[in-house]
Image (cartoon, grey):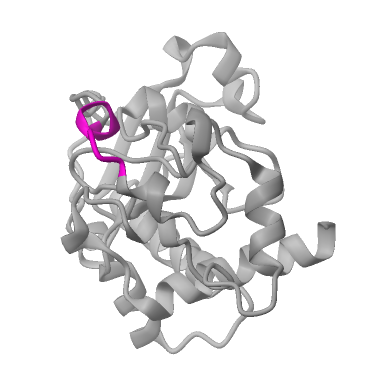
Amino acid sequence: MTAVDYAPLDEAGFFLRAIFDVATLPAAVRDTIPGADRFRQLILIGHGGRRLWEEVKAAGLQSEHPIDDFTQATVKRWLAGQLPGVAHELIYPGDGPVGLQALGRLAGWHHDSPFRVGVNAEWGSWFAYRAVVLADSSLPLTPSMTGDSPCASCRTQPCVSACPAEALQDRDFSLQKCVAYRKQPGSRCRITCVARTSCPVRPEHRYDDAQIAHSYSRSMAMIEKLY
C-alpha cells in the first residue's frame, strides 16, 4: 500500500476523502463512471465547513467557477506530489456525468434530508463533493463513515416548518413549489435556502453568507434559464 500525506488537502479544506477499489464498486455505480475500467482506484474528495471558501477567497480567483478552478489546481498539485508517475485522470470537475450522491452514499457521507441536500452527523449539510479521480494507485481503502441519518432522530424537523415555500410538506419535496417561490420578487430563498439554514445538525460548520450566496446564485441562474 502507498502511504500518502493528506495534509495539503486538509489545509485547503478538503477534509473528506474516500478511496474505493474500482473492481468492487457496485456495477450500477461503476458503469456510470467514464473510463473506470482503465484504473484500479477511485478517489472521492469533498470539502467540509468554511475552510475551502476561505482558501478560495485568499487565492483571489476571478473566474466564473472559482471553487472548481481552485479544486482542480489543488488536487492536481497534490496528485503530482503524492503519486508521482501514477497514471490518473481527474474526471470531476469535468464535463462527463458522475453519480456523486451514489458515491457519497457508499462513502457514508450522504443521507437524504427533507430539503434534498445530503446530510451526515459529522458535517450536517455543510459539505460538498469536489473532486473524483481515477488512478492506478494502491492507496489504503477508507472505511465508510458510520452512523444513521441525523434526520431519523430529528423530531421537530425545523427545516420543514421554516421553508417559506411549504415545499417540504407531506414528507415529500415539491420542486415545483420550491422553484415557484424562489422566482418570486422578494423571495427569501433567492440566494439561500431557509430550510437548509434552519437545520440544527452541526451549525458550527455552516458556510458564511457569501459562500451560500455564491452557490444559490448559481442555482438561481439555472432556474431562470430552465424555468
Q: Residue at 45% x, 23% y: name it.
A: 40
Q: Nearer the viewer, residue 30 or 149?
A: 149
Q: Position of residue 157 (x, y in %)?
A: 30, 41
- Quarter of the image where one finds residue 65: bottom right
Residue 3 appears in the figure: yes
Q: Residue at 57% x, 55% y: name it.
A: 165
Residue 136 appears in the figure: no
Position of the C terminus, as image quadrant, is bottom right
Q: Nearer the viewer, residue 142 or 135?
A: 142
Q: Position of residue 150 (x, y in %)?
A: 23, 34
Left or right of 176: which side holds 105? left
Q: Is 121 one of the magenta-colored residues?
A: no
Position of the N terminus, as image quadrant, is top left
Left or right of 81: which side holds 44? right
Q: Position of residue 15 (x, y in %)?
A: 24, 52
Q: Position of residue 93 (x, y in %)?
A: 57, 53
Q: Nearer the viewer, residue 162 or 61?
A: 162
- Quarter of the image where one finds residue 110: top left
Magenta stretch: give its range: 150-157
Figure disc tally: 0
37 is higher (above) or lower (below) than 65: above
Q: Is 153 one of the magenta-colored residues?
A: yes
Q: Residue at 34% x, 46% y: name it.
A: 83
Q: Residue at 20% x, 29% y: name it.
A: 153
Q: Nearer the viewer, residue 121 or 99?
A: 121
